[in-house]
Amino acid sequence: MLRRLYDWTMALARTRHAERSLAGISFAESSFFPIPPDVLLIPMVLAEPRKWFRFALVCTVASVLGALLGYFIGAVLFDTIGQRVIAFYRAENAFQSIQQWYDNWGAWGILFGAVTPFPYKILTIFSGFAGFNLLTLVVVSIIGRGFRFFLVAWLLRKFGEPIRLFIEKHLGLLFTLFMVLLIGGFIAVRYVF
């Protein structure tokens, strides 16, 4: 089943809808969606390495726009939508700790969340809820998300074929590692913060 999902994703990466799908996932992931855009960015760059820059740019721009939606949800729609998103990720108790984290680290904390598997949507919603400076959020999102997506895309472009072969050979192990990182980010939100 995992192999079929991989093959389907690789096939999707070559379609005319791939960039729109990448933009949609990147946008949604920064504001409410649990799956990171890397699941589509990686096969897209592997399928068409010459478009690595374009794919990373699409991912970054859509992610920053999604961060604005997350901010809006936190600032304006927290009581209706924001609390539901936070509850979905079981991060209700994390809000108090995130406030302290923001007080101590500010933009550096957002940058950390933008680059790591930490659920970025929690930070964007909290930024709106706490009234964090919107311009700072945008600048840090551009830097952090851009760094992450451009680095991944460039590495795949530079070492694409060996990486593709490695992924195909160790698909099960890599999927498990990906899930551990993804779930670990959510656990960090719940128990660390």
Image: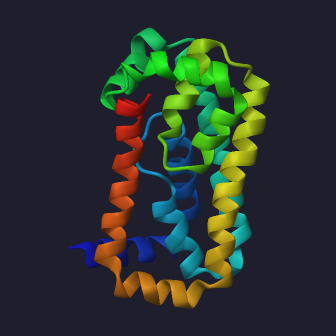
149 to the left or right of 34: right
Up the image or down, 146 lies above or below 108; here it is below
Name the image quarter holding the N terminus: bottom left
Judge whether residue 70 can be spotted in this image: no
Q: Where is residue 87 in the image (x, y as percent from the top left)?
A: 32, 23
The residue shown at (42%, 23%) is: 94
Up the image or down, 67 lies above or below 165; here it is above
Q: Where is residue 53 in the image (x, y as percent from the top left)?
A: 73, 68
Up the image or down, 130 lies above or below 193; here it is above
The residue shown at (69%, 72%) is: 154
Q: Where is residue 112 in the image (x, y as percent from the top left)?
A: 62, 42
**Quick one: 20 or 109, which is closer to the camera?**
109
130 to the left or right of 94: right
Name the image quarter holding the C terminus: top left
Up the image or down, 127 lies above or below 42; here it is above
The residue shown at (61%, 77%) is: 156
Q: Position of residue 58 (x, y in %)?
A: 67, 56
Q: In which quarter of the image is residue 90?
A: top left
| Colouring chosen for the image of the structure | rainbow
Tell which residue pokes out farthest to the left in this image: 1
**Quick one: 157 or 47, which is closer to the camera?**
157
Q: In which quarter of the image is residue 76?
A: top right
Judge whether residue 141 can be spotted in this image: yes
**Quick one: 8 or 82, which is closer to the camera?**
82
The mark total stands at 0
